[in-house]
Amino acid sequence: MLWPAESWGVVRLGGWAVERLGGWEDGRVESRKYAVFQPSNLPVIQSRRDMSIQVEIPGQKILTLTHLALDLNGTIACDGELLPGVVERIAALKEELAITMLTADTRGKGAATAATLGIELRRLTPGDEAAQKARFVQEIGAEHVVAVGNGANDAKMLRAAVLGI
């Protein structure tokens, strides 16, 4: 599926900017590559082919991300309720990545939240959730995983993933 060229340009979202790069064919985006950058201008190059995101770390390497491992409470939700803007952002990301939400589901809203977002839920068993999250990342191929979390039980997952946020 190709997007019309006129739909591209520079878009700014919460401090991020998205700019379309190369790949035009008959007025449409051929490769769907674009750069995402913060004010630091650290480039991220994305390609919708093969449902992945490529992140170029200047002077280092290019990461090919295929999966997002996502914490629930404190990361995308507060007290079990999704934060504003999360639904839209996840909708955009799931076109680029497979997404799994990892949670101990202490508030009992994990299944409903995953259904609302249209993503996979991995419910953790009580006890050493940090190790379970890290093991999940390793099982799906840590070299292609971006992990997002904010708690002490996310630290091992963030270290295990090729990109931890």
Image (cartoon, rainbow, N blue to C red):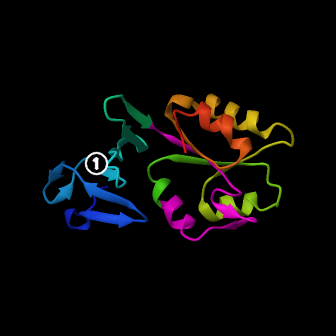
**Residue 108 coordinates in the image, percent (x, y):** 82, 60
Crowding at mark 1 (Cα within 10 Å: few <14, some 14-19, many 20+): many
**Residue 46 coordinates in the image, percent (x, y):** 35, 46
Q: Is residue 38 above or below residue 83?
A: above
Query: Looking at the image, which residue sits at the far right?
Result: 126
Quarter of the image for residue 43 reads top left
Quarter of the image for residue 154 reads top right
**Residue 115 coordinates in the image, percent (x, y):** 66, 61
Q: Is residue 60 above or below residue 93?
A: above
**Residue 5 coordinates in the image, percent (x, y):** 20, 62
**Which residue corresponds to the image point at 74% horizontal and 37% vertical from the top-left?**
130
Query: Looking at the image, which residue sits at the far bottom?
Result: 84
Write the start and end of the magenta stretch as one range.
65-91
**Which residue corresponds to the image point at 63% horizontal and 59% vertical from the top-left?**
76
Q: Secondary structure at mark 1?
A: loop
Residue 103 painted magenta:
no
Question: On the picture, is 61 further left or further right than 132?
Answer: left
> Which image quadrant: the N terminus?
bottom left
Quarter of the image for residue 117 reads bottom right
Residue 74 painted magenta:
yes
Report the residue marked by disc 1.
33
Q: Which amino acid type is shown beneath numbered disc 1?
A: Lys
Question: On the picture, is 43 further left or further right than 86?
Answer: left
